[in-house]
Amino acid sequence: MINKAIANILPHLPKRLVRIFANKYFSGENLSDALRESKKLNEEGCSVTLDILGEYVSKMEEAEQYKIQYLDVIEQFSAANITGNFSLKPSMFGILLNKEACYENYREIVKAAAKHNNFIRIDMEDSSCTDDEINLYLRLKKEFPGRVGLVLQAYMHRTLDDIKKMMEVHTEASPLNFRLCKGIYVEDKSIAYKGYQEVRDHFLEDLEYMLLNGIYVGIATHDAYLVEKSMELIEKHKISKDKFEFQMLYGVNPGMRRSIAGKGYSMKIYVPFGKQWFNYSTRRLKENPNMVWHIVKAIFIRG
């Protein structure tokens, strides 16, 4: 309870103090930082997905600037021969302001990635965006098969039904491609499961459906229980290792990351970077309030 209380206070503290905590969870403010850390992860045997921090633009001019940044990221990432791809938040490209302009921004970025034989992941945000983000994925998938994927959140009541509906466009040549995570946004209990084990159970239910139906899935979790149960499902159904991968966030539980990769599973690390690190990092802290003690030690013991 003390950790949670401190975690809720930290977002209101000066950024220079929060930065002590934040450094663990994002690769740096500049693309050069992200490329450097991505190369290190590649050397460790992990692929990466790069994400420019930022979301919920208030005007389309901001979305245009993010598009330009991502096009540059794709070019420099490709020139550096890094193994991985890219994650984009639709609210960063104006999905709540102008859906068609958001689509055009995404289309240009996916086209640039496809030119380099690469892939774009559409991040899932809060429930106000869910329908629009699914529609964005389906529209892009039709034009760029195999070059775009979507994130789904297991805590949403609707997720399994959404997966089943999207099976209409699933083919062996162009399979559905999802990252499955628990979900982090604060949602009402009428649309999202709230119980800790309840969310875990639905995560595994969604995952099993995906594995049994040939959907490529990124198993995105730091929960040791879910990692173990996911491996059991993979073994039970004899799923080929080219049909899934495990995914984790940069800076979170590197020991578990190495353990999973050491068992021969593909591991992808979500590598965020950019100047909008504050909100992202404090969100990570609220998810993992046990990190508070490490911050306290950093401030008062290591100075």
Image (cartoon, rainbow, N blue to C red):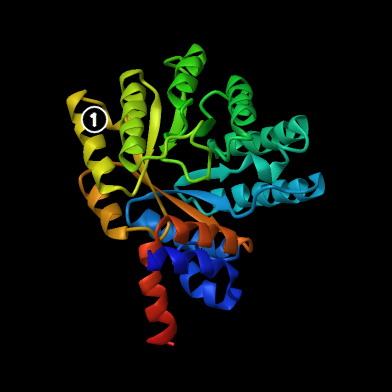
Residue under the image location 59 percent in, 69 percent down: 12
Residue 10 lies left or right of residue 102; in this view the side is: left
Q: At which x and y percent is residue 140?
A: 62, 26
Q: Residues within 10 Å of mark 1 (few under 14, many from 20)?
A: some
- Locate residue 79, reporting x and y percent: 56, 51
Q: Nearer the viewer, residue 48 or 207?
A: 207
Q: Residue at x 50, y 15 (%)?
A: 165
In this view, 5 is above or below 266: below
Quadrant where the C terminus sits is: bottom left
Q: Position of residue 298 (x, y in %)?
A: 41, 80
Left or right: residue 267 versus residue 6 is left
Q: Which residue is mark 1?
A: 234
Q: How many badges with numbers are in the image? A: 1
Determine whether, in the image, residue 141 is placed left or right of residue 215: right
Which residue sits at x=18%, y=30%? Answer: 235
Residue 200 visible in the snapshot: yes
Q: Furthest residue to the top?
A: 168
Secondary element at image label 1: helix
Q: Position of residue 125 (x, y in %)?
A: 57, 40
Say above or below: 239 vs 62.
above
Residue at (48% x, 54% y) in the render? 271
Examine the rendering and report whether any part of residue 118 can be seen. no
Residue closest to the eye, 54 or 74? 54
Q: Is residue 54 left or right of residue 240?
A: right
Quarter of the N terminus within the rendering? bottom left
Give amino acid for label 1.
Ile
Question: Would you place residue 285 above or below residue 205 in this image?
Answer: below
In front here: 146 or 182? 182
